Image (cartoon, grey):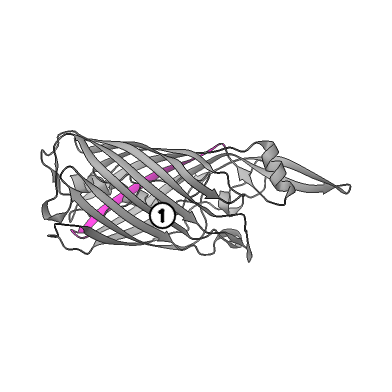
Amino acid sequence: MTRSLYLALLGGALAAVCSGPALADHGAAGTGASASGPLIGASAATMAEGKAAISLELTWARPDNRSDAELAALAGRHIHAHDQDHGEVYQLGLSYGLTDDLTLSASLPYVRRIAIREGAHSHVGGQAIDSVVDRGDAIGFGDAALLAKWRFTGEHHHGWEAALLAGIKLPTGSTGQVDDLGETFETEHQPGSGSWDPILGLAATRPLPRGSIDLSVMYQIATRGAQDTRLGDRAQASVGLTWRLWGAAIDYHGGHHHHDTAEGRPTLDGVIELNGEWEGRQNESGTTDVYSGGKALYLSPGLRLTAGGWSFALGGSVPLAQDIALSHPPVRYRARFAIGRAL
């Protein structure tokens, strides 16, 4: 049961990279409904052959909101900056163990970007006017993603486990949402990007008597999508420590998460992670936006309760350092809730 629940939100692990622009006001989903391991970064653990799981995760992202005066001032510098009240991503994840060493996952997000505002620069009667436009909400299904995780260290490895991740983000999301003025939102605000984006990653896990250390790196290659826009490559690197606070110790039979020592009894884990994110500059119609992209480092604590075949997780992320380009606001915090069920 432990491995099935762990992979319940494997799709969320890649969604941290590919469910939409990763920085600023665009939230990143994680692997919160797992039964063991990190909430956001990936683990090398795989599901047992023939096992399956389903999960649902909510990520709430709150930017460090800019005032109208700040947006108007940036517009006066010909920087088309934007803001929003908050962003929400509801992520459905499915996972299946094709073999003991190969797990297949799929994810589908539903995206809500609420109260988008943008600075505007215009000329009337020879006079420059800087203002702010309230554009409203962009809401719809985001881009689905498929991911394969292959654990290549072998079933009887008793030290570090390692796994290769590879997948693709599909252009299934909405790209035609319009604002309150009847104008189509730019691709960066749309729930979907309209692009086919390959995903590559590596994960490593070191089992501990009552937890694990997990390292992962994931990279998404952005291709050109809707409105002749390429949103920019994205990367995430994570290191996490999971520790069993209450309940039976974890049994790593066969070199990976297998079963709790007391199968079916409730357990409570504490998780702490460092998550680094990088996003490249976007390009529209051959023109690169030099005020897009950036990088950030987050501290992400959380708790996970597992009982009766269900897993519940609650966590958050706060920035330790940010270097965000001027077109996007910096992040204030992110919050996550997830629930998973082994099938």
User: Is residue 305 inside the magenta stretch?
Assistant: no
Q: Single out the residue that lies furthest toward the right.
A: 125
Q: Taking 297 as reference, is 62 above or below it?
A: above
Q: Taking 261 as reference, is 205 above or below it?
A: below
Residue 102: x and y in percent read: 23, 60
The segment highlighted magenta reads 85-102
**Mainly helix, strand or loop, the magenta region?**
strand
Residue 336: x and y in percent read: 39, 38
User: How many other residues sit within 10 Å of disc 1, few (<14), some (14-19) or many (≥20)?
Assistant: many
Query: How many numbered markers are drawn?
Result: 1
Can residue 264 be seen from the camera position used here?
A: yes
User: Is residue 97 inside the magenta stretch?
Assistant: yes
Given residues 1 and 297, the one toward you in this image is 297
Give the position of the C terminus as an image quadrant: top left
Q: Taking 264 as reference, is 95 above or below it?
A: below
Q: Secondary structure at mark 1?
A: strand
Amino acid under label 1? Gln
Residue 30: x and y in percent read: 37, 46
Give the position of the N terminus as an image quadrant: top left
* Left or right: 175 in relation to 4: right
Residue at (25%, 43%) from the top-left corner? 242
* Left or right: 340 in relation to 209: right
Residue 340 lies in quadrant: top left
Residue ID for mark 1? 236
Residue at (33%, 55%) from the top-left corner? 216
Given residues 179 and 229, the one toward you in this image is 229
Residue at (72%, 52%) from the top-left corner? 78
